Image (cartoon, rainbow, N blue to C red):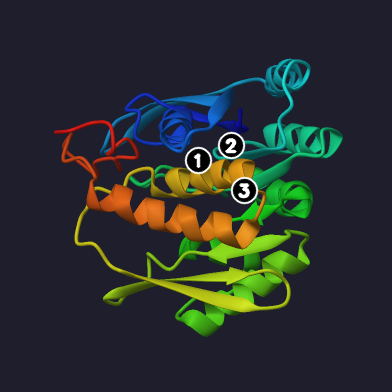
């Protein structure tokens, strides 16, 4: 059986966070363990409250899983404060986990999910132990300090993040303009561009969670970085095509589209 671990926040609307990770991993045939870092009260248009789990409890969740199961791959999502970032980074190193870091900074509705002290900790502690890092335009700008206007800037951001220690970097281009969405993949040697038609929908809540957990799932299955990203990106495209028109804001993707019929 293939295993993955998600270390992320809980989304009460089930469109992002560990709920979306669970759906994605399950859809891709991977058993997913969960470590909850924060509990959020949110829906498709706002986040009304955030409660962070104490860092020592986050660590104990990871320890409990690793004491019983052989887990190699996983992902991180919302790590909202410095203590949690440092604790998770320590455990990634301790257990030699290959982790896809989704550097969640702002929610789809605009809520700040990563405090300023945690941004610095992410760069200092988490990125150096990351296997993959998958920032969108705004996240890459915050991490690198450069303004991203086009593909050359995306390449430069990917190079900087790789130099921070990440093995593989994907700078996502969904927040840039254009009929095609271009993602830049960098392995330290070669830049690869992945192009997909832009889908005209507002229902993209949880897109970053879906992609990162899909990469982790395919890594658990194939242990091949470029193949895993390629399959994960194609899967995410389909989940956007099949996204759900629910709620009054940004509806969620539908990673269970092969199972659920609406």
Q: Which residue is mark 3?
A: 222
- Residue 256, quarter of picture: top left
When the figure is inspected, residue 236 is found, relative to residue 193, above or below; the finding is above
**Depth check, front residue: 203 or 69:** 69
Where's residue 24, x and y in %?
43, 37
Where's residue 143, x and y in %?
62, 61
The tally of labels here is: 3
Q: Which residue is mark 2?
A: 80
Where's residue 199, x and y in %?
24, 62
Q: In the rendered structure, which disc, 2 or 1, sits on the residue that comes first in sequence? A: 2
**Depth check, front residue: 165 or 65:** 65
Query: In the rendered image, which quarter contains the C terminus?
Result: top left
As helix, strand or loop, the secondary structure at mark 2 comes to: loop
- Residue 155, quarter of picture: bottom right
Distance CA(mark 2)–CA(mark 1): 6 Å
Q: Which residue is mark 1?
A: 113
């Amino acid at each position: 059986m293939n295993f993955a671990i998600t270390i992320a926040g809980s989304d009460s609307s089930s469109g992002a966070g560990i709920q979306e990770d669970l759906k994605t991993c399950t859809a891709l045939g991977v058993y997913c363990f969960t470590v909850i870092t924060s509990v959020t009260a949110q829906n498709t248009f706002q986040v009304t409250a955030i409660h962070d789990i104490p860092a020592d409890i986050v660590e104990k969740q990871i320890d409990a899983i690793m004491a019983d199961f052989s887990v190699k791959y996983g992902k991180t999502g919302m790590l909202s404060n410095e203590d949690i970032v440092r604790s998770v980074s320590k455990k990634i190193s301790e257990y030699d986990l290959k982790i896809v870091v989704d550097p969640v900074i702002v929610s789809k509705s605009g809520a700040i999910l990563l405090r300023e002290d945690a941004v610095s900790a992410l760069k200092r502690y988490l990125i150096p132990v990351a296997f993959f890092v998958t920032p969108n335009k705004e996240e890459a700008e915050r991490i690198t300090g450069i303004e991203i206007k086009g593909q050359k800037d995306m390449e430069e951001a990917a190079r900087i993040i790789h130099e921070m220690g990440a093995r593989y970097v994907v700078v996502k281009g969904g927040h840039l303009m254009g009929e095609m969405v271009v993602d830049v993949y960098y392995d330290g040697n070669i830049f690869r561009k992945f192009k997909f038609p832009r889908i005209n929908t507002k229902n993209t809540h949880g897109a970053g969670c879906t992609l990162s957990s899909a990469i982790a799932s395919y890594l658990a299955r194939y242990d091949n970085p470029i193949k895993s990203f390629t399959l994960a990106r194609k899967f995410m495209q389909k989940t956007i095509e099949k996204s759900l028109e629910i709620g009054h804001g940004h509806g969620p993707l539908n990673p269970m589209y092969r199972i659920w019929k609406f």
